[in-house]
Image (spheres, rainbow, N blue to C red):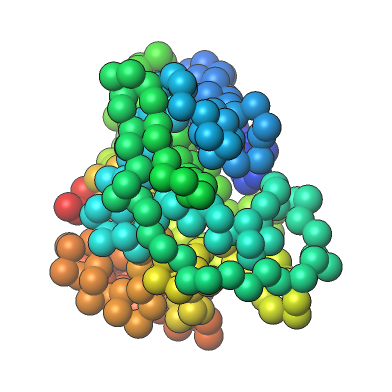
Amino acid sequence: MSVEAAYDSFGALGTIVVIGAADPDRLAAAVSCVRDEIELCDRSCSRFRADSDLTRVNDGHRGPVSEWLCEAVSVALDAARATGGLVDPTIGRCLMDLGYDQSFDRLDPDRPLVVTASHVPAWSRVLADRTTRRVHLPAGVRLDLGATAKALCADRAAARAAAATGSGVLVSLGGDIALAGPPPADGWAVKVTDRADTPPGVEAPGQTVAIRTGGLATSGTSARQWARGGTLMHHLVDPRTGRPADPVWRTVTVAARSCVAANTASTAAMILGAAAPDWLAARHHDARLVRPDGSVETTGAWPVGQPPLLQGTPT
């Protein structure tokens, strides 16, 4: 007789964290590992902590920083290269000018909009040396690692928890999902919705899929919106304009070999807009794209019927 996986959840990184353990007896140990990894991520990569390594680097620090930040910057630069700059970690100044200059729950909705010159991508001039643990930024550049760092944290936390417990583990950080270790017999059932912070007991529209390996990530604008100067803003900045991406899609969900790969592709697709389905298909990604009116388009082997199963391993 198969044993059902067990789950726990808590708030962190401004979102909802969900941990699943295929072996229910190992859930508490898995949660402890995930909490430790999240703290390392926040202490290294938060734009909103005065004591984080990222804040110090953005303020001009050139000395050694944490291994975590060096890896996170390297991963962000890999994402920029893989997407031709669509996922750009050097949009930190843009986000500040648009009003996203402190944690989301503390944003002031009455501040005016600051109109700046077009963003000049600088990711190709950012240096991250993991041997010396130093990060160098061009003058005036501020990094934002929000997307890829959260996905990296999910990947690292899942791997750490699975290694420590010997159990299959699922880690979801606000819908950025990473898997490690042997999955449950029927795979991990995941509800793909617009928002990962839907309260327990509330039925959110979406689709349930089953995944066994890799990662799954959803990018969208529903959970990170604010107003500036009468204009509705969101956190997905198009590096080509320095402004929030046009709302062609409400959400894009991608399955990939890791959470970082899935997040990179889903973020790029949101920014690409109408060109996203062809871009995703050309890269053999299984994806689900939802328009503002709720209509859905899929690419690759994304399942339409039930029970759907994704392997999470496209290239």
Residue 237 in the image, given as x and y percentages of width and height: 49, 65
Residue 124 in the image, given as x and y percentages of width and height: 29, 50
Is residue 4 shown to the viewer in this render? no
Q: Residue furthest front?
A: 139
Q: Nearer the viewer, residue 192 or 37?
A: 37
Question: Looking at the rendering, which quadrant does residue 56 occupy?
Answer: top right
Instruction: Please identify the quadrant where the N terminus is shown.
Output: top left
Does residue 232 lie above or below 169 as drawn? below
Determine the residue positioned at 27% across, 45% down.
78
Q: Nearer the viewer, residue 242 or 158?
A: 242
Determine the residue positioned at 45% across, 34% down.
153
Q: Residue furthest right?
A: 110
Does residue 249 lie above or below 171 as drawn? below
Residue 229 in the image, given as x and y percentages of width and height: 75, 76
Is residue 119 shown to the viewer in this render? yes
Q: Nearer the viewer, residue 255 or 200?
A: 255
Determine the residue positioned at 51% across, 64% down.
236
Q: Is residue 10 left or right of residue 61?
A: right
Q: Nearer the viewer, residue 148 or 304?
A: 148
Q: Is residue 231 left or right of residue 275?
A: right
Determine the residue positioned at 23% across, 54% down.
82
Tag count in the figure? 0
Question: Looking at the rendering, which quadrant does residue 233 occupy?
Answer: bottom right
